[in-house]
Amino acid sequence: MGALAAGVLIGPAALDPGPVLLELLDRLPFVDVDSGLDARGAAIVWELRLPRAILGALVGATLSVAGGAYQGVFRNPLADPYLLGVAAGAGLGATLVIVTIGSGSALVPIAAFAGAIAAVAVAYALGSAAGGRRSGVTLILAGVAVAAFLTAAQTFVQQHNADSIREVYSWILGRLGTAGWSEVAVMAPYAAISIVVIIFHRRLLDVLAVGEEEARALGVRPERVRAAVVIAATLGTAGAVSVSGLIGFVGIVVPHTVRLLVGASYRWILPLSVVGGAAFLVLADLVARSALGPAEIPIGVVTAFVGGPFFLVILRTSRRSLS
Amino acid sequence: MKRLTGLLLALVLTVAACGDDAPAGPTTTADTGFPVVVRGTTIDSRPERIVSASPTHTEILFALGAGDRVVAVDDFSDFPAEAASLPHFDAFNASVEGIAGFDPDLVILSFDPGDVASGLAALGIATIVFAPPPVTLDGAYVEWSEVGDAVGLSAESLIAVARTEIAAIVAQVPTYVRPFSYYHELDSTYYSIGSDTFLGSIYGMLTMVSIADEAGGGYPQLSGEFILEANPDFVFLADGETAESIAARPGWSELGAVQNGNVVEIDPAVASRWGPRIVDLVALIAREVHGVGA
């Protein structure tokens, strides 16, 4: 909440926090105050800052909970939401539209979403077909192979359309800069589905953490849990990348930070990742648009640049183990 | 009308230049001498097979009258129409062998991250790299003249015409109590230009100041709320966006430029090159902003 408030109150446009607060109050039912902001000031608050902060919260929450869930379901601390090829598939889809139509096209998010879903579907199909023991490991390897293949295709397309290379990079590095309410409306249902389904499975992930054989002995079917979590995480992540590009590091650093602070139980890690991820990304976006004055820093750069050292500090000061 | 004056002037200059020199064609002055050294590259004799890997330099070559000696251009060289129909290649992934395959005796590049130039030099092909791009109009004129030297044609009359036409337009710009501010959009993620860029210097001649200067100039990516707050007098779209499409962006309907119809769509090709068509860009901006010029 604090992060969200800061996200709305602070920005490169020099609006005093007081009038901004009054402007927000004014929109509440039965409250009528004059904020003193002109039409443009109001538009900055309502059309730009608020949707941007909310979108940042939704994306951060979704990426974090999806990352945490992947780390659990694959029992791999390096897992992140892009593990099974979401990023590569979305990147190829977005790049194809950007080079053929342009970065402003409404097809960019649709193509990114479709590419993300398709990549994971292929990785899942290949991984399941190859994995005799239905182990999560073959799924990861299939994801790595699909991601490498799609990234190569994306790089090829990008290099052969060098005139739009800046647009492609700016998409790849992630952005909330052009976000409005329409992106929030697109993202909200995917975030909701993804977060609800994953949190619903939190206890099963704890069981799975003991080991696949042990989980089976306890009556849990690992492949079923895996399928549900992968589908939910993929929907949420695909929604996130379609509206904000590839924002890295959130999905790894937030769940691990939570784990170091509260322990290894997914009953706590997943819900707290939702909150922590939302706050982290809103604050990162605040840095992205404020640190260099009116110029923007790509948010993916901020998440890694700020998140990396922050994570190391947590790692060093925490006595809990990662596993 | 302005164009006609320019042409007449070109003719006068050409005649003057032809006065005591060797005979020359109707639109070009006498061949300059060879061998000639341009940007450290020695060109021994008049190039007959030119490869241009830069849209700007393709335009300069054709404007100088060397178009019939150009044998291949890069994919983005789309002007004039004769250039667009030449064999073309991808300059961003250019290979030494690919370019050498056109059997050129002069290759012009505007950037060369893969060091194609030294490979071509090893094959004995004269190669000039025009980088970095100029940041002022005078810098652009220097490049025109260097291209002229390299191909054995004088750019003097071309430059004189451009100077005269641009000076005539600038002279008509009224004096204002404060300069107009503008936001020049390079792409739909709000990348823009500062007054310290080449394009910024063009706007500057027309007494306009970029809102991106506050972000340190250069080519910054601006934040959306800053653009709204700065409320530029004019918005120039060089990315295929339209007045309608930007009015639909969140909050942008509150921009003064949008409400007052001061949104100008400009051809990205014209606005990103520094060839002779720069005169057209100056004329367009002067007409849209000040209501003056050709």
Image: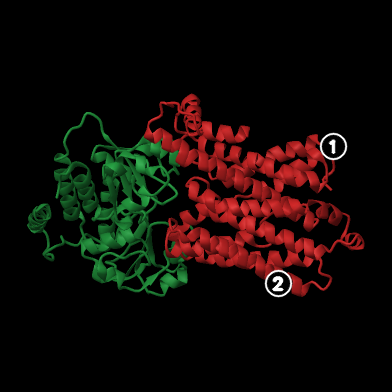
Chain colours: A red, B green
- Calculate the distance from the C-alpha at mark 2 to the C-alpha at mark 1: 40 Å
Q: Quick one: B124 or A21, which is closer to the camera? A: A21
Label 2 residue SS:
helix
* B94 to B154, vertically: above or below: below
CB under 8 Å between callouts 2 and 1?
no
Which residue is identified by label 2?
A: A125
- The three-letter code of the residue at mark 2 reads Ala
- Asked if labels 2 and 1 share a chain, the reply is yes
From the viewer's perspective, is the residue at label 2 or at label 1 nearer? 2
- The three-letter code of the residue at mark 1 reads Arg
Residue A26 left/right relative to A122: left
Measuring 41% from the left and 42% from the top, which residue is drawn there?
A: B251
- Mark 1 — on which chain does it sit? A
- Sequence-wise, the earlier of marks 2 and 1 is 2
Label 1 residue SS:
loop
Which residue is identified by label 1?
A: A319
Measuring 19% from the left and 41% from the top, which residue is drawn there?
A: B290
